[in-house]
């Protein structure tokens, strides 16, 4: 029972993993749908993971 609760990749510290959010603009369009825009975290560009350098990948000497 050695569960690792850590996520496999690093979570973006700026958005805490919630990289995109739908923001209502108020009002509805002619079909009755809520008008929303999707905002992406500028730090991770909507991926939710922190960008890591490739130093580890190319660490083979
Ligand atoms: Zn982010």
Image (spheres, grey):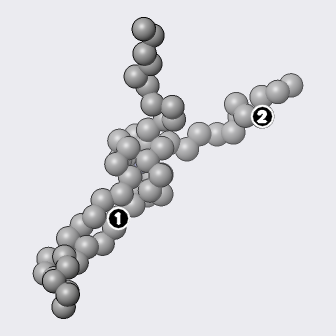
Q: Residue at x 33, y 67 (%)?
A: 38
Which residue lies under the disc numbered 1? 39
| Outermost residue toward the top in this view | 1
- Front residue of this view, candidates 16 and 1: 1
Of the numbered discs 2 and 1, the one sitting upstream in the chain is 1
Which of the image's four quarters has the C terminus?
Answer: top right
C-alpha span from label 2 to label 1 = 33 Å
Q: On the picture, is 9 further left or further right than 53? A: left
Q: Is mark 2 within 8 Å of ligand 1?
A: no
Residue 14 screen position, x and y as percent: 38, 45
| Outermost residue toward the right in this view | 61
Residue 32 screen position, x and y as percent: 16, 83
Residue 5 screen position, x and y as percent: 40, 22
Q: Residue at x 47, y 52 (%)?
A: 47
Quadrant in which residue 58 is drawn: top right
Which residue lies under the disc numbered 2? 58
| Outermost residue toward the bottom in this view | 30
Q: Residue at x 13, y 81 (%)?
A: 27
Q: Which dot marks residue 10? A: none
Give the class, few, some or many, for how many residues have Cα within 10 Å of label 2's Cα (few <14, many ≥20).
few
Give the class, few, some or many, for how many residues have Cα within 10 Å of label 1's Cα (few <14, many ≥20).
few
Whether residues under marks 2 and 1 lie with C-beta atoms below 8 angstroms apart, the answer is no
Which of the image's four quarters has the N terminus?
Answer: top left
| Outermost residue toward the front in this view | 1
Q: On the picture, is 43 further left or further right than 35? A: right
Q: Is mark 1 within 8 Å of ligand 1?
A: no
Dot 2 lies on which element? loop
Dot 1 lies on which element? strand
Q: Residue at x 73, y 34 (%)?
A: 57
Q: On the picture, is 55 further left or further right than 46? A: right
């Amino acid at each position: 029972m050695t569960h690792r609760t850590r996520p496999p990749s690093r979570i973006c510290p700026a958005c805490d993993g919630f990289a995109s959010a739908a923001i209502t603009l108020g009002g509805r369009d002619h079909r009755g749908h809520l008008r929303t825009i999707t905002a992406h975290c500028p730090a991770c560009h909507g991926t939710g993971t922190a960008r890591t350098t490739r130093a580890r990948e190319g660490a083979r000497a």
